[in-house]
Image (cartoon, rainbow, N blue to C red):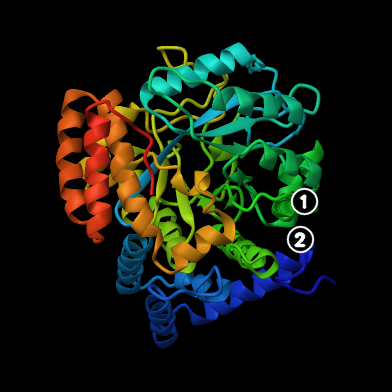
Amino acid sequence: MAIYNPASRCADEFINHDEILETLEYADANKDNLELIHSILEKARKNMNVAKDHCTVISHREASVLLACEDPQVNEEIKKLAREIKLAYYGNRIVLFAPLYLSNYCINGCVYCPYHAKNKTIPRKKLTQDEVRAEVIALQDMGHKRLAIEAGEDPKNNPIEYILECIDTIYNVKHKNGAIRRVNVNIAATTVEEYRMLKEAEIGTYILFQETYHKESYEQLHPTGPKHDYNWHTEAMDRAMDGGIDDVGLGVLFGLDKYRYEFAGLLMHAEHLEAVHGVGPHTISVPRIKRAADIDPNDFDNSISDDIFEKITALIRIAVPYTGIIMSTRESKEVRERALQYGVSQISGGSRTSVGGYVNEERPHDTEQFDVSDNRTLDEVINWLMDNNHIPSFCTACYRAGRTGDRFMSFCKSGQILNYCHPNAIMTLAEYLADYATPDTYDKGIAMIKRELELVSDPKVKKLAGEHVEDILAGRARDFRF
């Protein structure tokens, strides 16, 4: 029988089934224990502005107690604390990105994904390098600087050499003032050698969703293909870090299994990465299962309400304050607007989830991985963010300045990251305004930049950032960073 050990390299030990069951029992036994609950919240609050040696400031058991609690006053306190923590670590900036689907060829049998090998209703497509270039130009013309590339698992059609060639193409497309400055990668679990190749290709974050941490459910949901191997998949982040990738992104697909089980497993994975590598997850994504070709979300009976979904987001921010929380266009404008208040720090905008979808004026649906709930353009998303007092940021400075992995975490945990992020967000917003914004968005953006510059605490940084903004808006220079 596997014994729980967060420092183990074996998935059955660091995501230990018995430990999760005991955690859920403990949470149920203490969900009305207000003395304990308030002590957990106070622990999180005290740790908010203190540099810590660990990625999580409250444990998976403590966070699970908060999740189980149904007291309305406690739930409001959770949301309030999540807002405070998000502002303390990341300020009011929101990083923007777009997914780029390279290929929907896949040999896996995942029952929740329309790319599964047995789906004969979806046309299969793989982008050529000329098509990749065209997609990137379309994304640059929107104003994007950061992409997350996606591809199905298919060693014949999507080998690592193809992924690397696509990354090289993306980085080398320079169209007008456009440039993709960071490519994050979301591809199937692979070997240390291939992760090392991705690192050498200068990727940003390696992202891999666990889908579900419940091993029995995982194997049933992935009946065929290499993804069926739970341990190989779950241990992928360790191999990625062994290959030199120091920024990794976790995530589960909420709705596949019981959300309390998934929540505990997700935090245990974060604790494991910290215990073994000294660095927790750079990002955590919170997707929910959505309708797609050949996929009906009603076939899965573990869906969660918007209220529970928002509470999960808030608790991830409290438990793992240093991580970037990602929410995609799977969610509606209304859900995203609320979640931004509770800890989300990165969102996609103007997304297309089909292979080759950006070059088409009309949104194609035949190769979409999931239905998009937020169909607004990137400019509309930026305008909306500013209406809600969020600074839209296209910053990639930490990655390009080498502030990744433990170096990023040390700056973030000590509160110093805002000294970089805030002025960098202001300057990248100025780039967007100069090159891509509609008149209304431009006017709102200029007003926001003036307000935010006044909030820069360091006089030298304020002066220099202001000068850089003037240079950007005048077209004299760009791509400044602190």
**x, y (%) of residue 68?**
48, 70
In front of the other: 27 or 145: 145
Q: 456 or 95, which lies in front?
A: 456
Residue 341: image x %, image y %? 31, 55
Label 2–label 1 contact, CB within 8 A: yes
Whichever of callouts 2 and 1 sits on the residue coming sooner in the sequence is: 2
Give the residue drawn at x 57%, y 71%: 60
Residue drawn at x 14%, y 40% as measured from the top left: 447
Total numbered badges shown on the rendered structure: 2
Local secondary structure at mark 2: helix
Query: Could you tell whether 330 is left or right of 462 in the image?
Result: right
Q: Which residue is mark 2?
A: 11
Can you give x and y, in whole percent of width and height, for residue 118 in the image?
Answer: 74, 25
| 145, above or below 268, in the image | above
Q: Is residue 175 left or right of residue 132?
A: left
Q: Mark 1 highlights which residue? A: 230
Considering only vertical position in the picture, is 159 above or below 283? above
- Give the quadrant of residue 126: top right
How many C-alpha atoms fall within 10 Å of the one at disc 2: few (<14), some, or many (≥20)? many
Residue 43 makes an appearance in the image: yes
What whole-number distance in Å separates the C-alpha atoms at marks 2 and 1? 8 Å
Residue 223 visible at all: no
Q: Secondary structure at mark 1?
A: helix
